Image (tube, helix red, strand yellow):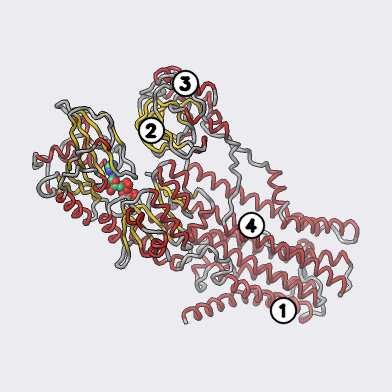
């Protein structure tokens, strides 16, 4: 630990404020902040430098695809130097290598740009007091001396010294490895602490506040913080791979291996059986290798992921882990919080019961009609809250449950602050979702002490002699109406209680109840139906009471007859095997604590499910990490939960999860479409080459022609498959299982059909052009084959891009694809018709009949694919 930081622990809060030249109440002035930002720079950890352009190019050149191409270039150079052959081959293949690397660099750059734009959307913000006003600012703007206002769930944004702390504890595992939270206080320490973990009055950047609230002064930022000192440079360029991209990469590698083996075999065949010269057969072998390699596939995968992430962000689902793009499409269980995600979090008290008589309906009562005996209930209730209503038009401060309480007071012309003047607050035990209650402690006007507790009825420690039959009766009545119910109790003390926590509440008396309506989000009902159709089970996990949860779950379609709702306690009473047997039928978990969530996630996962889990609180982080897709709330979520999540909902809305599922599935489908589009042409090329060479025809395609087809005619339109919109049926099929192969769902069959179609037509047209229409003229055969392969595979991108029968819509709904096709189509025509280019690519001119045959054959693949779709549909419906 640094000496200065250690010395700070010895000072009193006021000495620290003086030393940091700031104010413990007003913070820094805005002008000082500006000056200090200039002097100290941003509060950020330095990131490792990105590899420079040359390194990036070398990286691309070192993959197996490029190595094969480079070998071809080297071979062509050798041929140019040693034989009569000219330099065109070397320059064309070299040009294609450059084009391919160029495309890869460009696509990667745009993918990275898209991702870093997302990063700024998830940037940490923090509440800071400057010039006496609270404001929310990006954590990167903090300067030494800034006065922070932090609470449970916040991640500490910079090293700071506490000025005031209320029931504060922090999880410092990231720095100290200690998994238990440590208690923090603002007082000066008598001794210099030995380690970070002992520095009770300091907060360290990157650690998490697990309880309480505080104000603290920033003492070090960025790389000067303790975290900055141990953080090895953050390597932001580290790329994560999704299971699909891993599988595709290994497919590309395997194909490259096939390419090399195929190349060697053809070299042997042509030298041994057809007595070609070694250099000629070497060139044929290289052609085959080039034919087999799907040059553009890896880039298309990266691009599809990046595009998917951007689309999800537009729909308010912000991806933090790239792998989540794919996983979210495959989830089959979504375990969602209720409050704020399924419901609107706009809480209004519609009924209350002040401890006697009948429950009151708020809309039936005005200030003037308020029964006198209700005033005490409302006053006490107000005392036990922290929320504040602000002037109209400004954001109110506080949690929605508490805002509902102060709004109720306002309805009757009462305010919390007036009551607090009469009953000054002396202590608070803040609410947390484990204990589900909150207690405040006050002096009374008559010089006594009073504790007021509010929260979940089953968590209020009423005195044993209290009869709460009526309280329970009205509670259940409220809950059955889908109201969120809070009970309240109080205890008066003649002398000041020594310990101001729930253990002092030995004679707690009931005060009354409030019933809060929190309407479901209207878009949630159709989203749950959509999830069901897509094979996804939605499960509600809530801290609320069982009856309330059941009523709402029923209303929004989560709970149906025959399905089960249970409490966290009932869950805890179940053994692992009981839970495993029942989990399929449980749809609602009520009165849960955050630790229950992990058990639910794990139980589903053991059944092979892929689980998405939402969470917002500080204690939800472990469950978010355990889930396959952890989802945090952008609006109400704590920084801690956001840090643990794979995805953040910018609008806290359940419906957004379903939109992300749909987008995730679309990304996956689009990648598979690109695989189908590219790989089948590669396969057809390999087999055609091998057959032609075995027949003694020599290579029917030159390396240059193959590369034009693979990189230009197929590669460029292939990129735009990543922009395909979702297929209409995408949310009507069940999610893929974790073990599903990429060839599942008919991809294998489709690739076989297209490969065979191309093999037959290109071999056929080659033979026709070379032998049928002419007297052994390889040039014509080659040209006809080239045209059919290049243009035919551009035309049949349309039947591939839609799984439905081909329609006008399919031809018009992807303008970027259409533009790329027009461009590549024109390029191919220019290559064939413009003589100097045709010569370079060894293409001959065709007569009218040959052109007409080519044009006719171009449509065959489209017709075959459409016919295959029809047959598949018929066999499926049979
Ligand atoms: P979800 O997990 O669906 O978001 P939730 O937000 O309703 O559920 P909690 O916030 O843990 O879950 O609330 C659970 C219970 O705690 C509520 O039913 C209520 O009785 C009580 N409660 C909620 N907010 C407060 C509060 N500010 N003060 C006291 N008690 C509260």
**Mark 4, residue position:** 298
- Taking the image as shown, residue 763 lies to the left or right of residue 410, namely right
**Mark 2, residue position:** 168
Q: Is residue 647 above or below residue 742?
A: above
Q: Residue at x 24, y 32 (%)?
A: 441
Is the Cβ of the residue at disc 2 closer than 8 Å to that at disc 1?
A: no
Which one is in front, 567 or 535? 567
**Mark sitting on residue 191:** 3
C-alpha separation, residue under disc 2 versus residue under disc 3: 21 Å
Pointer 1 or 4: first along the chain: 4
Q: Residue at x 54, y 48 (%)?
A: 114
Q: Is residue 448 above or below residue 247?
A: above
Pointer 4 or 3: first along the chain: 3
Residue 811 is situated, as x and y percent measured from the top left of the image, at: 53, 67
- Taking the image as shown, residue 340 lies to the left or right of residue 672, namely left
C-alpha separation, residue under disc 1 versus residue under disc 4: 31 Å
Residue 122 is situated, as x and y percent measured from the top left of the image, at: 47, 43
C-alpha separation, residue under disc 4 versus residue under disc 3: 59 Å
Q: Is mark 3 within 8 Å of ligand 1?
A: no
C-alpha separation, residue under disc 2 versus residue under disc 1: 79 Å
C-alpha separation, residue under disc 1 versus residue under disc 3: 90 Å
Pointer 2 or 3: first along the chain: 2
Q: Can I make out residue 387 in this image?
A: no
**Mark 1, residue position:** 764
Between marks 1 and 4 in the image, the one whose residue lies nearer the viewer: 4
Residue 426 is situated, as x and y percent measured from the top left of the image, at: 26, 28
Is the Cβ of the residue at disc 2 closer than 8 Å to that at disc 3?
A: no
Between marks 1 and 3 in the image, the one whose residue lies nearer the viewer: 3
């Amino acid at each position: 630990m640094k000496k200065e930081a250690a010395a700070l622990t010895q000072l009193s809060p006021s000495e620290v404020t003086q030393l940091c030249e700031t104010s413990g109440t007003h913070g820094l002035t805005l002008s000082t902040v500006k000056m200090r930002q200039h002097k100290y720079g941003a509060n950020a950890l330095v990131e490792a430098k990105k590899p420079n352009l040359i390194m990036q190019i070398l990286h691309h050149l070192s993959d197996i695809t490029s190595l094969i191409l480079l070998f071809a270039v080297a071979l062509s150079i050798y041929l140019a130097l040693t034989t009569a052959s000219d330099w065109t081959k070397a320059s064309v293949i070299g040009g294609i290598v450059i084009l391919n690397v160029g495309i890869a660099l460009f696509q990667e750059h745009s993918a990275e740009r898209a991702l870093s734009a997302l990063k700024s959307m998830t940037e940490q913000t923090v509440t800071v007091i400057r010039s006496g006003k609270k404001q929310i600012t990006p954590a990167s703007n903090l300067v030494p001396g800034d006065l922070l206002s932090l609470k449970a769930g916040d991640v500490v944004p910079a090293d700071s010294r506490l000025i005031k702390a209320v029931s504060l504890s922090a999880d410092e595992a990231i720095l100290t490895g200690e998994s238990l939270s440590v208690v923090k206080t603002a007082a000066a320490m008598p001794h210099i602490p030995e380690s970070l973990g002992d520095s009770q009055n300091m907060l360290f950047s990157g650690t998490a506040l697990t309880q309480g609230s505080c104000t603290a002064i920033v003492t070090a930022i960025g790389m000067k913080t303790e975290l900055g000192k141990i953080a090895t440079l953050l390597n932001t360029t580290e790329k994560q791979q999704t299971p699909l991209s891993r599988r595709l990469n290994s497919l590309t590698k395997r194909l490259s291996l096939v390419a090399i083996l195929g190349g060697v075999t053809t070299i042997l065949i042509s030298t041994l059986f057809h007595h070609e010269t070694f250099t000629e057969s070497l060139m044929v072998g290289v052609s085959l290798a080039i034919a087999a390699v799907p040059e553009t596939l890896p880039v298309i995968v990266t691009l599809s992921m990046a595009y998917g992430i951007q689309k999800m962000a537009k729909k308010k689902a912000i991806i933090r882990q790239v792998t989540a793009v794919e996983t979210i499409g495959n989830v089959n269980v979504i375990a969602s919080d209720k409050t704020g995600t399924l419901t609107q979090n706009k809480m209004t008290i519609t009924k209350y019961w002040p401890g006697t008589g009948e429950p009151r309906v708020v809309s039936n009562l005005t200030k003037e009609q308020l029964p006198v005996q209700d005033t005490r209930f409302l006053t006490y209730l107000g005392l036990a809250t922290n929320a504040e209503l602000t002037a109209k038009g400004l954001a109110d401060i506080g949690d929605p449950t508490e805002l509902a309480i102060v709004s109720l007071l306002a309805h009757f012309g009462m305010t919390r602050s007036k009551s607090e003047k009469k009953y000054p607050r002396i202590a608070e035990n803040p609410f947390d979702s484990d204990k589900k209650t909150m207690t405040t402690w006050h002096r009374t006007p008559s010089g006594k002490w009073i504790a007021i507790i509010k929260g979940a009825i089953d968590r209020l420690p009423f005195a044993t002699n209290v009869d709460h039959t009526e309280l329970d009766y009205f509670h259940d009545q409220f809950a059955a109406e889908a109201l969120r119910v809070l009970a309240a109790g109080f205890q008066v003390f003649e002398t000041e209680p020594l310990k101001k926590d729930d253990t002092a509440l030995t004679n707690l008396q009931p005060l009354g109840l409030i019933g809060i309506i929190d309407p479901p989000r209207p878009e949630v009902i159709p989203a749950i139906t959509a999830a069901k159709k897509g094979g996804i089970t939605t499960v509600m996990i809530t801290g609320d009471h069982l009856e309330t949860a059941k009523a709402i779950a029923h209303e929004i379609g989560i709970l149906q007859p025959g399905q089960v709702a249970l409490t966290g306690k009932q869950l805890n009473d179940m053994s692992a095997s009981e839970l495993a047997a029942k989990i399929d039928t449980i749809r609602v978990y009520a009165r849960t604590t955050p630790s229950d969530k992990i058990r639910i996630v794990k139980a589903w996962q053991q059944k092979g499910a892929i689980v998405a889990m939402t969470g917002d609180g500080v204690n939800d982080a472990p469950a978010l990490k355990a889930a396959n897709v952890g989802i945090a709330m952008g609006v109400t979520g704590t920084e801690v939960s956001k840090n643990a999540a794979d995805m953040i909902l910018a609008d806290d809305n359940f419906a957004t999860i379903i939109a992300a599922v749909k987008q995730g599935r679309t990304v996956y489908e689009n990648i598979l479409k690109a695989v189908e589009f590219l790989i089948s042409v590669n396969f057809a090329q390999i087999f055609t080459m091998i057959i032609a060479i075995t027949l003694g025809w020599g290579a029917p395609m030159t390396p240059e022609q193959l590369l034009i087809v693979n990189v230009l005619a197929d590669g460029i339109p292939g990129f735009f498959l990543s922009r395909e919109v979702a297929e209409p049926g995408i949310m009507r099929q069940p999610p893929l299982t974790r073990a599903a192969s990429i060839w599942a769902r008919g991809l294998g069959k489709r690739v076989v059909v297209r490969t065979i179609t191309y093999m037959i037509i290109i071999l056929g047209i080659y033979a026709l052009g070379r032998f049928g229409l002419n007297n052994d003229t390889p040039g014509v055969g080659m040209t006809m084959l080239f045209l059919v392969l290049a243009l035919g595979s551009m035309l049949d991108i349309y039947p591939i891009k839609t799984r439905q029968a081909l329609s006008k819509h399919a031809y018009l709904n992807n303008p970027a694809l259409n533009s790329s096709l027009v461009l590549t189509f024109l390029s191919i025509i220019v290559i064939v018709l413009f003589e100097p280019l045709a010569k370079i690519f060894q293409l001959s001119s065709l007569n009218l009949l040959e052109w007409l045959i080519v044009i006719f054959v171009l449509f065959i693949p489209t017709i075959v694919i459409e016919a295959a779709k029809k047959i598949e549909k018929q066999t499926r419906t049979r």
